[in-house]
Image (tube, rainbow, N blue to C red):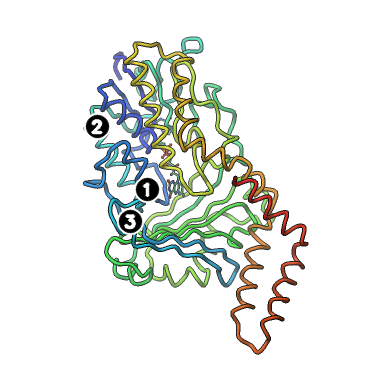
Amino acid sequence: MSNEKFDAIVVGAGPSGNAAAYTMAKAGLKVLQIERGEYPGSKNVQGAILYSNALEQIIPDFREDAPLERHIIEQRMWMMDDESFVGTHYRSDDYNKPPYNRYTIIRAQFDKWFSAKVREAGALLICETTVEELLLDGEQVIGVRCDRLGGEVYADVVVLADGVNSTLARKAGFHGELDAGNVALAVKEILFLPEEVIQQRFNIKEDEGVVIELMGKVTEGMVGTGFLYTNKESLTIGVGCMLSDFKANPLRTKPYELLEKLKKHPSIAPLIEGGEMKEYCAHLIPEGGFNAVPRIHGAGWLIVGDSGGFVNAVHREGSNLAMTSGRLAGETVIAMKAAGQEPSLKTLKAYKDKMDESFVMKDLKKYRKLPEVLHSSPQFFTAYPELVNRAAKTFFTVDGVDKHSKEKEILGSFRSKRSLTGLVGDAFKIWRASR
Ligand SMILES: Cc1cc2nc3c(=O)[nH]c(=O)nc-3n(C[C@H](O)[C@H](O)[C@H](O)COP(=O)(O)OP(=O)(O)OC[C@H]3O[C@@H](n4cnc5c(N)ncnc54)[C@H](O)[C@@H]3O)c2cc1C
């Protein structure tokens, strides 16, 4: 490492760090990016859906060479009990018209591609190097110390894009400790299958793709969801629940056991049958929402992506919030340099203002009450999926019982599990927490 001073040091080469580094390097700033992995993407896990809009605003022509798997034409949402599911499917040929809105990606390949763009834009990337701490002059962050001999590097601004554990910000006292009630633990597998098998099973052709979001009894009452995504020649399947719920679950089910259970579900098993598992990973996701977002700026530092808790768990969006926060952090530093300003707390507040104005904070704010409501209402993950599935079975089974009696039976089963006030109260709670 040299004694050279940079305009900005970006810690981490995930979507948020790459977005920040690219934005600044493209504008001619002297940028150093430090990644602890062997290469960008080597340490990263994602489902993974890429939302085009956030990337378009950084690299408008990304579709020309980005490693994209399938564009999504159909969204399914399944509420599951142990044997069945009740679901909605939304499929539209509008999603078959370019420019496509969402794609599946494989993060290891995507991060590598994004990182190449960052380097083309002029940033210097150093891999296999861990930033161990921030260098401070009083309250001002002036650089970083890495795990290399002579590893002190200086910059006007350090952008912390180091992911959900956010060790550096915690060490520096910018955040509190990770709270198990604010993070989900997710496990996922990539299962390889021939392209034509995937197309046949999911009723798609060429590069079309399907997303299935899953909730219900599979999470054993814990707040969490599952997912199944189609890649070109593989499927991604995963499940995640709040870490505090895993700890408190009386069944003591391990995350990989939940995934095994999901894979054996009679509605899932035929879709993944014969899939060869080539990748398994577990990762935390910051799902504390609006109330868990820490301070994201200070003298000489900015926090972006998962490190700032920018994940919209309801819509399963993370990488787009990461890229948007990275871009806005980059633009803040560019404007600061252009105006000849110092990287003070006051100057860098422009980043927080931009974030507050963006969809990122607006969406997190919209759902700010939801985590608490879901935590205090396990019935959404147990009783309701069971009741809805039982109701569907009663309604659709033709067995000589008249329809009026069936309706009475369905109503009765709901009321046996939840009183009328309970039912109305639950609907109201969800409505109020999602406004
Ligand atoms: C199972 C799973 C499924 C998901 N599915 C989706 C999805 O479908 N769509 C979506 O939009 N989002 C999804 N997400 C969320 C998404 O992955 C994250 O929001 C996104 O990756 C955040 O990007 P980031 O750059 O902030 O952090 P990361 O991608 O975690 O990158 C952080 C980087 O920093 C590096 N690093 C950490 N500490 C240091 C250090 N001290 N020194 C140097 N380098 C360091 C790490 O090696 C890593 O490369 C999913 C997450 C999980 C776990």
Which amino acid does the dot numbered 3 rest on? His
Residue sitting at x 56%, y 63%: 79
Q: Quadrant of the N terminus?
A: top left
Question: Is 312 rendered above or below residue 205?
Answer: above
Q: Position of residue 175 (x, y in %)?
A: 56, 27
Q: Nearer the viewer, mark 1 or mark 2?
A: 1
Task: Determine whether 27 is above or below 308 in the image.
Answer: above
Image height of 371 relative to 277, above or below? above
Q: Tell me the kind of residue under disc 2.
A: Arg
The answer as to whether callout 1 falls within 8 Å of ligand 1 is: yes
Q: Could you say which is closer to the camera, residue 152 or residue 227?
A: 227
Identify the mark nearer the N-term, 1 or 2.
1
Q: Residue at x 35, y 35 (%)?
A: 13
User: What secondary structure is marked by label 3?
Assistant: strand
In the visual, does 3 lie left or right of 347?
left
Q: Quadrant of the C terminus?
A: top right
Residue that badge 1 annotates: 50
Residue at mark 2:
119
Three-letter code for the amino acid on which mark 1 is drawn: Leu
**377 on left or right of 81:** right
Label disc, if present, on residue 71 of the rendered structure: 3
Mark pair 2, 3: CA separation: 27 Å
Q: Quadrant of ligand 1?
A: top left
x then y, percent, for residue 385: 62, 64
Distance (Cα) linking label 3 and label 1: 9 Å
> How far across and down, in percent of the image, does residue 376 sit?
70, 49
Q: Are marks 1 and 2 in contact (CB under 8 Å)?
A: no
Residue in the foreground of this view, choosing between 44 and 318: 318
Name which of mark 3 and mark 1 comes first in the sequence: 1
